[in-house]
Amino acid sequence: MDNDFKNIVSTDWLEEHLEAPDIRIIDSSWYFPHEKRNAEQEFIKSHIPGACFFDIDKIKDDETDLPHMLPPSEKFNSTVRKLGVGDGHKVVIYDGFGMRSAARLWWMFKVFGFSDVVVLDGGFPKWVKEDRLITAELAAKEIRHLTIFEDKSLVADSDDVLRATKLIHCSIIDARSEGRFLGKDPEPRSGLRSGSIESSINVPYETLLNDDFTFKKKEEILDIFSQKGVVFNNYIITSCGSGVTAAVLYLALDEIGCTKISLYDGSWAEWGKI
C-alpha cells in the first residue's frame, strides 16, 4: 500500500514551506484537565513561526454543557477568518501533545467544507526535538474571505449512534483506553458511568501512533483496524471521551480509504449520561 499520506505532512515539508504565502499554520493544542497544562500560555511562550492559536474549548457550541462541541458555522467562519485563513490557503495544524487535538481541528475544517487542510506529523514535540525554528513573536493576521458549507454527514449524534448499535452494516469504534472502554478505569469527568457503547469496538488512538507520535505506516494502521474486526465498507462512527481523540481514528480511517465515516461529537461525555 502506498504510504503517501494525503492529510499529514512531515516536519521536513513544513520547514520547506514555512514562508510560502499560501500556508497558514494553526496550533490547536488541548490537554486533559489532569495534565495541568495551559495550551494558550504555552503557545504564547513558544510556537512555530507564523502560527496562530485555536482554542477548541472556546470555539464551541455555547448552547450545550457538553465539552467543546462543534460550533455553529458562523462562529467557526468568523474565528478562522480572523486567524488569517481564507479561500486558496493551505492550513497546517499541529498540537503540543504530538497528535491529538490537531486531528480534532482538522475534522472541524472538513465539516465546514475546507478541504486543503493537513496535520503536522509528530506535532510540536517532534518539531522542537529536531531543533527547528521556534518563536514567541505573535504574527499579525489580516482578516480574509472564507467560503464554507457545513457537511453534516461527517457528524453523528446520539440518535445516529443508537441506530448504529442495531445495524450490522454499521461499526462504532471507540478511541479511549482499554481500561475505560471495559469499565475498569473511572472516567476523568464526573457524573459519567463507566463502560462503552453497545457493540462498539475498542481501538485506542495511541495504537495508531509511533513513540514519537507520528502515524504508523498505512499497512500497520490497516492491520490494527482489521485485527479488531473493523469492516471497512461499513458506515463507521468514531467515538471517544469527548470527541477529540475520535478524530485521530477518523483521520486514520480516511487515510486508508474509508469513505463512510462520522464522528460522534458528544461521545462518552454524552452517552455516559444516557
Image (tube, rainbow, N blue to C red):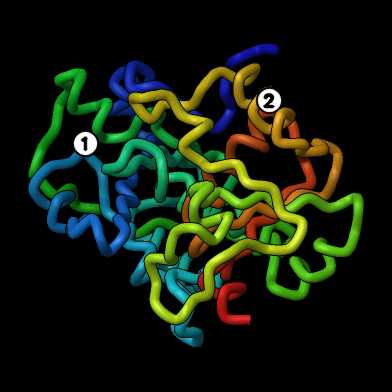
Label 1 residue SS: loop
Judge the density around disc 1: few (<14), some (14-19), many (≥20) Cα neighbours within 10 Å: many
**Which of 59 and 97 lies nearest the eye of the viewer?**
97
Disc 1 residue type? Ile
- In which quarter of the view is residue 31 placed? bottom left
- The three-letter code of the residue at mark 2 reads Leu
Q: Residue at x 57, y 74 (%)?
A: 272
User: Residue 203 in the image: x percent, y percent?
Assistant: 60, 41
* Residue found 15% across the figure and 26% down from its top: 133
Quarter occupied by residue 39: bottom left
Indicate the position of residue 9 as horizontal and vertical percent values: 45, 25
At a point 47% along the width and 55% down the height, the residue shown is 244
The outermost residue toward the right is 168
- In the image, is 255 to the left or to the right of 49? right
Q: Circle 1 is placed at which residue position?
A: 48
Residue at image mark 2: 222
